[in-house]
Amino acid sequence: MKYTNSKRKILICRMMVATLLISFVSVGVAQEDTGTVTGRVVDLDGKPVAELPIFIAPLDDDGDGNMSPVFLPNEHAQLRRARTDREGQFSITGVPSGPVYIGALPYDIDTRLPKDFENIVDEFTSKDWTELTQNDIDAFVSSNFGMDPEDFEPDVEILSLRIRGITLYPRYDYDEIAFGLKPGALIKNVEVTVQPRMRIRGRILFKDGTPLVNTRIGLYTRSRNVDNAGSSSGGGDVWVDADGYFTRYIDEKNDAAFYTFSFEYQNLSVEADPIRLDPGDRSDGLTLTFDSEPIPPKRPTQKTETDEPELSPPTPELPSIPASSYDVWVVNPENGHAYKRVHCETRDDAVAQAIEEKAHLVVINNEKEQAWLEAVFGHKFYWIGLKRVPATGALSKRTKEWWQWDNDDPITYANWVTNDFFAESLDASERDYVVMTLPDGKWYAVSPESVIWRMTKMAILEKDGLVSTIGK
């Protein structure tokens, strides 16, 4: 995702407060609660991809039931990393249980991160966050260790993940491929398929041939389809490395287009001639020259109490998006089914969302599935797909009603809490639907008069069809 300077500062400032206490330090997870994932990375022809840094990271719960990937560079410590060998093999240990996703990093990520990266982070986050001044935040945001989220963009795109015989694909609206791990899980022989990303790579020089190095410069991009059927524009920053080279990745396009790149540095500007890129192209020969003698990068300066206060940019109004839009389908490697947590006003609302997703409320068939759901989605009040229905046929001679899963699966497992656990003075025979509750994920039957009924605003959906259709 590309950001303008003002949007980047707003985004980082917002994330600062939300992640200050947890983002920069490794979470102290007991070894027995973490898992290991091993496998290999290959290209579209099945050939191994060597020396590629890949990672597995948690999909964080923001406290309101929404899941989101880690925010880089600030949450770099949450990544569990490995680098593929000559055969494309990798082994990632210390993977936390719960919902996770897999991703790639730039080949030169280790040279990009400052040597004292973790120490700087630890020093900053050791401060009492309630006493941080605006000067502290401004200094952190302006330098940000010289890093930016776009500096973590990988040179490859992950196309698919094959895990225990099931092939998973990125969701249509995100890049992550999500799956879930139980505590202590060991998943072997994972296969990650990647392809090179579209890009433009070039070099920035001054008129005497000296390269501009180790700094960030402004980049403005204009594109026009070759058939003039469409055009777009955008801006942001790009990092120029120690040899004066920059790389700008382009989201995969289906049509050939002409791209025009303009660069700004301090008071200088330069524009390249239009470059045609077809889908999948990579252009590495661009050279641009500023009409100026070499100008060293500006160093960020600390404000003093006598400095005039700087007005912060206005905070834009964010669009109202249903919370469920942020949640993801998470695959259980044990059974190949995919699960998704959604927000809902009522159980009927949850059922309607399930139908729209071509899914159903979760059906829990055994203790292993129950344990996996708890590990991935935690202990909250969730609607599940169990309901009371009138008995028919021979069964009606023994009872008037019985429990049934929404998808008609037979009941092979139960995890009930006692009827009086929540001290509700309600007749148990009048409770027609079931909620997975806080105490160890146990099930509790509820009726519209139940307090638990009114408290339950989330549900877990399940898909047991083809995993490749998820998110499409």
Image (cartoon, grey):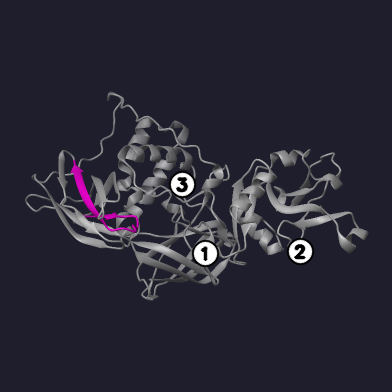
Image position, residue 399 (x, y; %): 90, 56
Mark 2 and mark 3: Cα distance apart in space: 44 Å
Q: Which mark is residue 23?
A: 3
Seen at 37% across and 29% down, the residue is 314
Looking at the image, tell me whether mark 1 or mark 2 is earlier in sequence order.
Answer: 2
Question: Identity of the amino acid at label 1?
Answer: Ser
Looking at the image, tell me whether mark 2 or mark 3 is earlier in sequence order.
Answer: 3
Image position, residue 7 (x, y; %): 35, 38
Seen at 16% across and 51% down, the residue is 272
Mark 1 and mark 3: Cα distance apart in space: 32 Å
Residue 114 placement, left or right of 390: left
Image position, residue 197 (x, y; %): 33, 61
Image position, residue 361 (x, y; %): 67, 54
Over which residues does the magenta segment extend?
245-265
Q: Which residue is mark 2?
A: 410
Element assignment for label 2: loop
**Which of labels 2 and 3 is toward the front?**
2
Q: Which mark is residue 468?
A: 1
Check the image and report above or below for 138 versus 39.
above
Magenta segment: does it hold 188? no
Seen at 18% across and 39% down, the residue is 266
Seen at 25% across and 47% down, the residue is 222
